[in-house]
Image: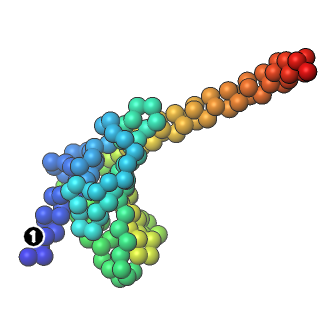
Amino acid sequence: MKAKYIILSILLLATITKAEENINGAFGYYLGRVGENEKTKCKPEFREFKECEIKVTPKTQKIYLIRSTYLAATELEAKKEFTITVECLKEIYTEPSPKKILSEEPKIRQDFTFILTKNNRQIKCSRYNQKIVLEYTDLNLIKQCLEEEADEKAKNLSIKNEISRSNKQGLFQMVSKGN
């Protein structure tokens, strides 16, 4: 029974058809598609990951991040869920044949973070004590998002500088002459 539950969970976790395919998304959301920033229920849910957060680029509104967090009751339970989640991800996204080479081999770092990267898309599963964070990311869209945010900040700074310059030159003089 437990094996059937794990197999069903594996099938529901990612929105892909074969292990050789790219990382497309999770929980019913697709990286790169138009969406909106929101916190919502995961559809479908995967084990204890029930809520997810969607982030989109400011201008194009494309989904660049799908994140779900699970807070376990105990650290032991978190360790178990982290291990099961990582094994599910490995089974879905890695091919058993040594002929297939990924952009980056999946690995678990010392700080309990599993990272798998394929074609500028990344899955990261991290455990911090009792908290597990599962993230699907489009690395190209994150770069685009950061550039869009930097452009917006530069534009706002330019407008503020222009207002400041205008106030110093014209508005102050108009007020002074009017008195």
Is the image coloured rainbow, by chain, by secondary structure, or in one colour? rainbow
Residue 139 appears left or right of 32: right
Query: How many numbered marks are there?
Result: 1
The location of residue 15, given as percent across then percent down, is: 21, 49
For residue 88, which quarter of the picture? bottom left
What residue lies at 12% left-to-right and 73% top-to-bottom? 3
Q: Is residue 66 left or right of residue 57?
A: left
**Rendered location of residue 143, percent (x, y):** 48, 39
The crowd level at tag 1 (other Cα within 10 Å; few <14, some 14-19, many 20+) is few
Which of the 4 quarters of the picture holds residue 30? top left
Q: Nearer the viewer, residue 24 or 56?
A: 56
Rendering quarter of residue 71: bottom left
- Foreground residue among 60 and 103: 60
Of residues 125 and 131, which is closer to you in this image? Answer: 131
92 in relation to 152, above or below: below
Is there any visible trace of residue 96 in the rendered image?
Answer: no
Residue 7 on image: x %, y % = 13, 65
Q: Residue at x 57, y 32 (%)?
A: 152
Which residue lies at the image location 28% right of the left edge and 63% below the top edge? 50
Q: Which residue is mark 1?
A: 4
Q: Is residue 9 above or below residue 67?
A: below
Q: Quadrant of the C terminus?
A: top right
SS under mark 1: helix
Pick the quarter of the image with the N terminus.
bottom left
Furthest-front residue in this view: 179
Above or below residue 177? Residue 105 is: below
Q: Is residue 49 visible?
A: yes
Residue type marked 1: Lys
For residue 105, above or below residue 47: above
Where does the image place residue 138, in percent across and percent down from the top left?
38, 43
Q: Which residue is rendered at x = 13% and y = 76% of the image? A: 2
